[in-house]
Amino acid sequence: MIEKVVVKDRFLTIIMRVVYIFLISAICVISFRCSDDSEVKDEVIACFEIETQTFYVGSPIRVRSCSDDADNYEWSVNGTIKSYSDSLVFIPDEEGTYLIELTVYNKNKSDHVQESIAVGNYSGLVIQREYPEETTRLKSVFLTNDGGLLLDYNSNDVFIADSYHYKLLKLNNQLQEEWTWKSPNYFTSYNNSTLYETPNSKYLFTKNMRISGYESGYFYELNGSDGTTELLELPYQEDGFLSYTTAGDSLIYVGFGGNQDDYDLVLQTTNKFGNVSDSPIAIDFPNKSVVGHDIESNDDGYLVLGMINDIGADKTNQEILLVQLNTDYAISWSKTFELTNIDRFANEGKDESWELIKDENGDYLICTYPLVIKVNDDGDIIWEKNFETNSFPGLADGHVRKIGENYLMSLWHQLILFNSDGDEIWRVKTFPKFINDAIVLDDHIYLFVAIEKVVTQGDQSQQVHEIHINKLDMNGNYVDF
């Protein structure tokens, strides 16, 4: 009897355990289902916010979703799908009305919202010139120590070909005209220039001009208050200078000299008041033609950026040259880099405006437009980026300004902000306006653009370029003055 009771008790224990496991499992399943059902999103509400305040052709328009319970997004502009992320950035290419639409989805629902915006053309300030008698082509904009600007441009009689005057226009910090200076002679063409403000508030100015096919370098001293000018003498006027660096109490200019298609790299030293005491230094590269574009001082001497080409070779074989000079101007090392997309004008390399920019870490940016190469102080490549513009690829005209840790590049029809790793942050398109230069003042970008106009005289008509100043915030949005 005792043994039967024990067996029965064991049987009951097994039954109770099975029932217990079953109940626990059922509770877990029910709990899971309840939890899963609580996460089902019955509704989704579409919503977006337009972060851009003003809407202009070529300027990025930024839109961000504020939708509730959305898992997926679909953005369209004027019926064309543009993005599947939770935000949208697009650049309008013409004025008119743009319909922005957002459709959002979750597992069970969808919702839609839309809004129309009106996009216009931005004009900004217009620098009035002497139309229709002259056409104006702005080359560079220089910041001056009084907070103003000095504009380097040329003009010519609209109806007389190749009759350029060289001009300077001084603006105060309110962008109002203070004075202008005009060269006394006509020139058939003009190239790059440099500007240095002396300790006694004068401007040292170099300009390379072509007269009847002959290239000459001119060295001017301008009075900063009224623009009165004195032509300074250079020992060898056939030399042209494209940039300079400071070294103690001296200025070291870099450029080119010699015969066309067989240029030597040339350096010229002056003091900070423009006094020339020594003859220029010509550095010969055997069987090569070299033009120096920019120069930076460093602990080892001077780093020079230039263009190099075989004498007599096709200009499309040009390469980028980087040369380290010691303090006695002897070559320590030199390196060349391939110049990609060189769809240029088969010139001699002196019409370019290449720049060499030193950053806070001692590395250098080689800016040849649209190609930018970052190298260390030994000339080894860190990264290389081609900021292709899809309009005039490889065109040489451009400028780069360092803004904090980032870089602002103006390039023909586009303005591009990129960081120290070469990553593009934003881009503004200005077509059909041509960008001449861009500077930063008081946390705003001032963009100097040229707008083509047609003037007539009798039965003749010609294009002129009108200079406009556009104002943008640091995110690339146009703002009013």
Image: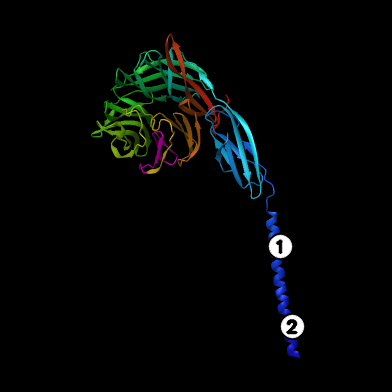
Residue 78, given in percent of the width and then of the height, sits at 58, 33
Residue 294 vertical position relative to residue 457 in the rendered view, above or below? below
Q: Report the span colored magenta.
A: 356-380
Residue 394, given in percent of the width and then of the height, sits at 38, 33
Residue 378 in the magenta stretch? The answer is yes
What is the residue that sits farthest to the front in this orientation? 79
Depth check, front residue: 215 or 389: 389
Residue 51 in the magenta stretch? The answer is no
The disc placed on residue 9 is: 2
| Any part of residue 226 in sight | no
| Amino acid at the residue labelled 1 | Ile
Picture quadrant where residue 132 is located: top left
- With 286 as the anchor, is 401 left or right in this view? right
Mark 1, Cα crowd under 10 Å, few <14 / some 14-19 / many 20+, is few
Q: Residue at x 56, y 39 (%)?
A: 81
Residue 42, given in percent of the width and then of the height, sits at 69, 49
Depth check, front residue: 164 or 251: 164
Tell me the quarter of the image containing the C terminus: top right
- With 163 as the anchor, is 261 left or right in this view? left
| Any part of residue 419 in sight | yes
Q: How many marks?
A: 2
Residue bearing the label numbered 1: 30
